[in-house]
Each structure stands twice: as C-alpha cells, then as structure tokens.
Image (tube, helix red, strand yellow):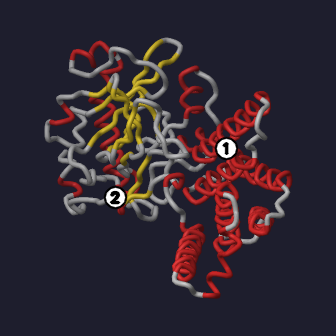
Amino acid sequence: MNWILAHADEPTLRSAADYVGSPMYEVISEHQFAFIVTLTLLAVVFIVRKLANRGNAWASRLVGPYDTLKSANRFLFWMLLVAGTIHIALLPGHEPSIWSVGYLLVGSAELYLAKQVWAETLHKRHAKLVLWASLIGYTVTGLAGVVPDQIGLGTKLVELAALGVLMQPAPGGRLRRTMSTAGIVSLVVIVGFGAWVGAFSGEGGHHLGETAGPGTLIPQGEDREPTAHEIEEAQLLYEATRDATRKYEDPAVAAADGYDVGNIFGLDYHAPNAAYQSDGRILDPLRPENLIYAVGPDGPVLVGVMYEAEELGKPGPAVGGPLTVWHGHDHICFSLTPPALAGLTSPFGVCPAGSITMPITGEMLHVFVLPEAPDRFGHLEEDWLTAYLNGDPLPEVYEEASDS
C-alpha cells in the first residue's frame, strides 16, 4: 500500500505556530490578560519616570518617596508590586474557585506589602509569611495536578527573588547566613518539583485536543470521530507494521539490519536506524526509522516502532485521520559530551549543565504492536506497560479500552 499517496492533500509545511505544546512552556489563554496588565503597568511606570525627569510636578511628587529608598528596598518594592499585580489580574481569566480566592488574598497582601516598602514601614516577618504561603500554595497546586505555565512560574521566580532580599541575614553569624541560603535553595527545589509534577499530571497525550506533555508538540485542531475509511486505513497500518517488525522481537536481528540496539534499557528505548532515517521513505512498515523496546523480567520486549518525517515541519501522512496524529518535540536538552539526549528544559527554563536546548524536531508517529495496547498510535502509560511486562492484571481503564 502507498501510505504517502493516501494523504496527498496534507499541507506542505507546518510552522511552530501550528503546534500546541506543553502549557509549562507557554502563556495559557486564561493568563494572557495578566501578562498584558503587567506590561501595561511597566509602560505606565516608564512614562511617569520620564515625566518626572522632565520636571513634571505631579510625576516628581509621585516618584519622590521611591528615590529615597535603598537599592534593596527598591528591588523588593518592584518584586512585590509585580507579583501582586499579576495575582489580581489573574482573576478575570478564571471561574470563581478556591484558587481565585487564593489569587485575591495573596495579590492583595503583596500589593499592601509593596505599599509598606514604599512608606518604609514594612514588617519583614509578615512579608516572609505571605511569600512563603504563596510559594508553598503554588507547589500544592502542582502536586494536585494543576499544569503550570510561564506566567505562574515567572511570578514564583519574582517571589523567590523578593524572599531572597528579605532573608538576607544581619552582618555576622555564619549559621544564619547558611540557614538563609539553604532555605532559599530548598524552596527553589520544592517549587520546581511541584511544577514538574503539575506538568506531567496533564493528559500528556498525542491526539488532537489533548494537553501535550512537557517536550511534546501536537498539531492544532479538535478531535473528532474517525470515518470508516480512516479506521480501515489505521488497522491496515497497524497490521502491516506488526507483521513486518515481528522479526525484530529478537534484538540480534534488529542489529543485523542496522538498528542501534547495543544498550537497551528502561521502558522506552528507541533504537534508531541511521540508514532508514534518510532514505526518502516515509511511513514504510518495512523500514521504520526507530524500533521501541522495553526491558521486562525476561529481557527486551519489542513494544512498537516510531516513524519519522525527514523534513522539518512536513506533516506526516495521517492515514487514519484522528487515530494517527503525528507529533513533534521541543524543549529537548541535548548533551554535547557525549552527544546524547539529556532530558527536558526545566520549569525554570534551563537544561542540565553541559547541555543545550534543541529546536523543534520533525514529526513522528508511534505504532505500538503489542496486541493489547490500548492506544496503538498514541502513548503507552508506564503503569500499563509495567503491568503488561510483569504479567500482572492490566489497569481496568486500559482493559476496557483494549476491548473496544
């Protein structure tokens, strides 16, 4: 079967704007108003400062108290003002909930603290309590499954900076300095951990309309029911892939055909074939670009394949319509010494030391050949795959899916 001609009407190229990525790396629509308000605030302040510099009496009276503040207090004032403004501006984008109450309380408290800094009447202990409560509260939302975005993470960084100023110990006292530093570092780790948990608590799927997991890009669009023809084409693709790759259940055969299976480990080992990745053939069951293995109690198990499109931005032939949605990746960290994947860009926008962030990848499609696989063309959950490899009862939700 000619899989490419089956979808010849696909657009020729996709740009980065045609994909939906993890909310952790974006500003979600509910928070865009807060982003605009913050930029407007900064613009207004810039204008007021310009007017004061030109001798405007009103503007000079307004900025006069600020100019008398010490540099540390000026910084603290800005951090509290920005964080409080963002929290209040988040309210219009959310339905009333316990989170909205939290935004209102924390935002109001931070704005009040900023006013106290301005008037030089700040009680540091009160300010520390407010910031600790906001940061721990954000961590709890992540642990509860709320996916973070750049506005939320940016606000936490602002609050961490403000807390760092407040926790500077008095001169002398090595223990106090050590405890202050350890407290800030620990809080950064705690907030980052909560953000990671929240990011991976989303749907993490590969189908249209689902929430993309960290590092995953899904084409924009809404999910729909597949047509009878698309169901038939998807079934044919699955069967052709399963039959053509059955021989690779033996990694030695895969190695003989050029797949890199020298060090299979974990539950998601992708064994590439360099020759097939640049042969000009797309979605060919006889020449899949990657084999996917998982290590079970009895050794490596062939889980499926990953087809790759060679040209960046070129949509893969989705022969099964919404059943066979191709996806890409971004925010992937790549180690230079030795050359290898090193992970994902962290919630705070950095990669592990010695690695760099890779740009957007080409599109790819998983086809899982395990007969019981609940989602043949999407994503296999780790708990399902672990149960399958160990011969344990499969999670109920997946048993239902695989029976359908």
Image coordinates for residue 397, horizontal then vertical, percent: 63, 42
Quadrant holding the N terminus: top left
Q: Position of residue 184 (x, y in %)?
A: 70, 40
State the SS at label 2: helix
Q: Quadrant of residue 67?
A: bottom right
Residue in front for this viewpoint, 328 or 63: 63
Give the CA separation, mark 1 to mark 2. 29 Å
Give the mark count. Answer: 2
Q: Residue 39 carries which label?
A: none
Tell me what residue is drawn at x 58 percent, y 21 percent: 391
Check disc 1 and give the amino acid type. Answer: Val
Q: Is residue 283 left or right of residue 349?
A: left
Residue holding disc 1: 191
Q: Position of residue 272 (x, y in %)?
A: 29, 28
The three-letter amino acid code for the residue at tag 2 is Ala
Question: Dots 1 and 2: beta carbons under 8 Å?
Answer: no
Q: Which residue is identified by label 2?
A: 16
Residue at 25% in and 36% down:
285
**Residue 22 coordinates in the image, percent (x, y):** 50, 52
